[in-house]
Image: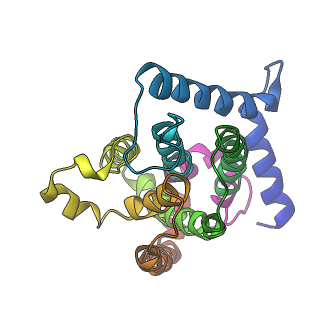
Amino acid sequence: MNLNLLAEFTKRDFTERYSGSILGVGWSFISPLVNIMIYTLIFSQIMNARLPGATGEEGGYSYSIYLISGLIPWMAFSNTVSRISTIYLDKKHIISKINISLFRLPLFIVLSESITFLITMFIFLGFFIVTGQKLSTAMLILPFVYIVQQILAFALGFLLAQLTVFIRDLKEFTAILMQLWFWFTPIVYVVSIVPSSLSEILVYNPVYQIINIWHQVFVYQTIPDMTGIIVITIAAHALLFVTFLMYRILEKDIRDFL
């Protein structure tokens, strides 16, 4: 699939979400803005939630920043995995008509979700500054962290996409998996409230390692330990390599089953 076709798929995927609406793509800015306002109102003003040791605690926005800075990368990761896992079923009408690379096809979802992520993050950064928080040099590592998480999301989604063609129940399984994974990752709660027996297991959750970096940078404004993300980088590339080998073996069968 050439770059022009990839760009066209990405454009259509992003714009079709709001087709028929008056504001169109404008909703991509309005929706995250409203969500941030809701989280801030509920947790900072109504529930008066606080986060021990976090920068900005006096202003009362520490927990909102903790929650939003974890949710934004999680949504990019979760949506990428979930949407890629059903890509061949969703686009089988295109696959049957066009000789398109099944390996490159899911890339437009990664790009589309990245555009959504960038828009949401831009709005969050505005909120972050307005609430009196300071930008730090530690934020320079976040683009690398995001790329790693999306490579992992692509590899996992690509694996599930191939298997889902043969085992359709995996579509429902993936939805349940992502829901359980969300609650197994400290996004709405902090690690300190988790029993020690469970917190020892959390370190093996790759998404926890990723989200923890976002929390460290935005909430505590410190440069985190990068050991975990380096291990995840290696693991993500290894998973991508294995799934690509599986794809080379199963490609013909995938097209036939569709």
Using the image as rendered, state which of residue 217 and residue 179 is in the foreground.
217
Using the image as rendered, state which of residue 244 and residue 82 is in the foreground.
82
Q: Is residue 193 left or right of residue 206?
A: left
Q: Judge whether 129 appears above or below 154 on screen.
A: above
Rendering coords of residue 138 (x, y %):
60, 67
Rendering coords of residue 175 (x, y %):
39, 41
> Where, by quadrant of the figure, is residue 36 drawn?
top right
Rendering coords of residue 31 (x, y %):
67, 28
> Where, by quadrant of the figure, is residue 221 drawn?
bottom right
For the point 47% across and 76% down, the residue is 226
Q: Judge whether 42 appears above or below 133 on screen.
A: above
Using the image as rendered, state which of residue 62 and residue 210 is in the foreground.
62
For the point 54% across and 51% down, the residue is 73
Rendering coords of residue 89 (x, y %):
54, 46
The stretch of residues the image draws in magenta is 79-108
Question: Is 97 in the magenta?
Answer: yes
Using the image as rendered, state which of residue 221 and residue 147 is in the foreground.
221
Q: Judge whether 246 appears above or below 196 on screen.
A: below
Q: Is residue 96 left or right of residue 72?
A: right
Is residue 96 something that shows in the picture?
no
- Quarter of the picture containing the N terminus is bottom right
Residue that protrudes farthest toward the right in the picture = 4
For the point 40% across and 46% down, the residue is 187
